[in-house]
Image (spheres, rainbow, N blue to C red):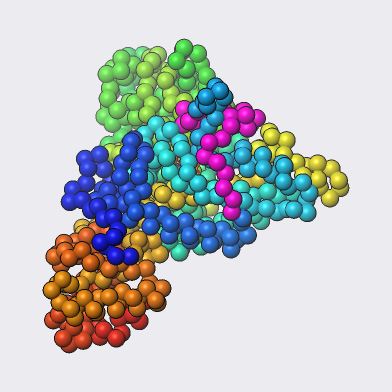
Amino acid sequence: MKASQFLISTLKEAPADAEIVSHKLMMRAGMIKRLGAGIYNYMPMGLRVIRKVEAIIREEMVRAGAVELLMPVVQPAELWQETGRFDKMGPELLRVKDRHGRDFVIQPTSEEVITDIARQELRSYKQLPKNLFHIQTKFRDERRPRFGLMRGREFTMKDAYSFDRDAEAAGKSYDAMFAAYCRIFDRLGLEYRAVAADTGAIGGDRSHEFQVIADTGEDAIVYCPTSSYAANIELAEALAPEAGRQAATQALALTPTPGKSTCADVAALLGLPLTQTVKSLVLATDTRDEQGNVVASQVWLLLVRGDHDLNEVKAGKVEGLKEGFRFASTGEIEAHFGCKPGYLGPIGLQGVKVVADRTVAAMSDFVCGANQVDHHYTGANWGRDLPEPDLVADIRNVVAGERSPDGQGVLAIQRGIEVGHVFYLGKKYSEAMNATFLAEDGKPRPFEMGCYGIGVTRLLGAAIEQGHDERGIVWPVSMAPFEAVICPIGMDRSEAVRDAAQQLYAALQAAGVDVLLDDRGERPGAMFADWELVGVPVRVVLGDRGLKDGVAEVQGRRDAAATAVPVGELVAQVK
Ligand code: ATP
Ligand code: MG
Ligand code: MG
Ligand code: MG
């Protein structure tokens, strides 16, 4: 590619709404362009990276035995009504009507459509196992789109779906996907952790998230540095049900004096290990809907910074309450949050969770009802709406240092970006949609299914969070938009430079290197700044002075200085 033909739109300054480094650098490097909230144009430079990521994913999926197809973005509502998701899913699901008034959804994922295909096309056990995938545009009307491609509304996902004859075979399909994901993220050059995740109503232990380690991540991972234990925060919480139940029972039995007991008194009564900075808490028993009906009975422990009179808490005078941490809960949690009953975790153990965007409006004296609880709960990502670093540090203080469930060491917490998710679905969709195959005994049986997602576009942001410096992006080579750039100095004046640049360009192309020739005639400083910002891994500088001695300067994006390389050795060196 020649730079003069390409569309290059680098910026000096990132727009004000870009909060984290990956978003800023992607905007500055001209990789994406905002069209609306959470909706971006993938500009030519960014699209090249996306295509490279897709190619690696595709290769590894096919290697693992999956078959590619492509399902529509716009899907008829009927299928979504069959599983009940058309009504059950909250506002994240974008519903549209056509000219005849028929309902459609813009797909956030494709379980319904793939199950519909399977029930028509996979009739016999002899056709199993099958794993079908596509790489397709998704739309989720996220409440809080942000961080550029990291949490977009429109984004690209690779989603795969496996169909098996029984649970054992489905386990093998799951393991194959798990291994493929490791290969994919290894090839993408990312530092990541596969963490056990909650399986909700489906049960079992087959759900893992692949988390790219980054302080700006919206997820939290609890792990043990001295063993293989790693879980996302919600699962870690579920693992301590007994202790949590006790804390909840204790909490409910309390009768503090209205108007007198402070949060700290209650903490002392419970014997909870509160830290210096987080020292107050309030309990809530009921979750109410907008009409005031109790929809779930739970115990909520909310930490607030500072020590407050409960009357003030009740009157809503205490700031910070709307960002509470849920530590323990009982009752109808499954129905309400899609989590297991008895999904509990005490303070000081692994069970720290933040409830996103929650407001606590009505509280009766001490054991109080919290209404307007987030009905749009997407999982436990305690960092999501709590960007304040000191609060995060508080959470670390409370959780880290506890013994890991495998007894092999103490727990630590780090933040992560969920870039992939593998999930054993069992018969959830096949039963709901009556998707069966004929088993060996001639009887119809519902498929055992699994689903496997990768956030293709989110991966760009995640990689940049891990790879950048003050000059710009430092891509893993496998993701870089170009593998090498040739920067000729004084190309317009010097025939020697022009010839050498053209020859090198042709030779590198012939050698299969994805090379860019910067023929724009820019000053060296401007050229270098652009390609450092964009993050091209190797730069070759050709100038009259060097060419006189038969050399060019080669500099890796991570190198401190350039090396002089004889012109004849450039291809071998760059390749
Ligand atoms: P999150 O917890 O971040 O909301 P999710 O658990 O809802 O993600 P999945 O349903 O597991 O997402 O979808 C599979 C993958 O799609 C995720 O692991 C993630 O990488 C990606 N993804 C999900 N939502 C978004 C989004 N809004 N923007 C970009 N990528 C996304
Ligand atoms: Mg989500
Ligand atoms: Mg998630
Ligand atoms: Mg997920």
Residue at 57% x, 48% y is 70
Q: Position of residue 344 (x, y in %)?
A: 51, 34
Q: Which residues are magenta?
A: 68-95
Q: Nearer the viewer, residue 121 or 26?
A: 121
Identity of the residue drawn at 29% across and 86% down = 568
Q: Quadrant of the C terminus?
A: bottom left
| Residue 570 makes an appearance in the image | yes
Q: In x, y percent, where is residue 503?
A: 29, 79
For the point 28% across and 38% down, which residue is it? 388
Q: Is residue 110 above or below residue 259?
A: below
Q: Quadrant of residue 140?
A: top left
Query: The N terminus is located in which quarter?
Result: bottom left
- Confirm whether residue 311 shows in the render: no
Disc tally is 0
x, y (%) of residue 41? 35, 45
Does the segment drawn in magenta span residue 435?
no
Q: Position of residue 563 (x, y in %)?
A: 22, 79
Q: Is residue 326 left or right of residue 442?
A: left
Residue at image point 55% right, 22% down: 101
Tell me if residue 84 comes above or below residue 113 in the rendering. above
Q: Is residue 93 above or below residue 21?
A: above
Magenta highlight on residue 80:
yes
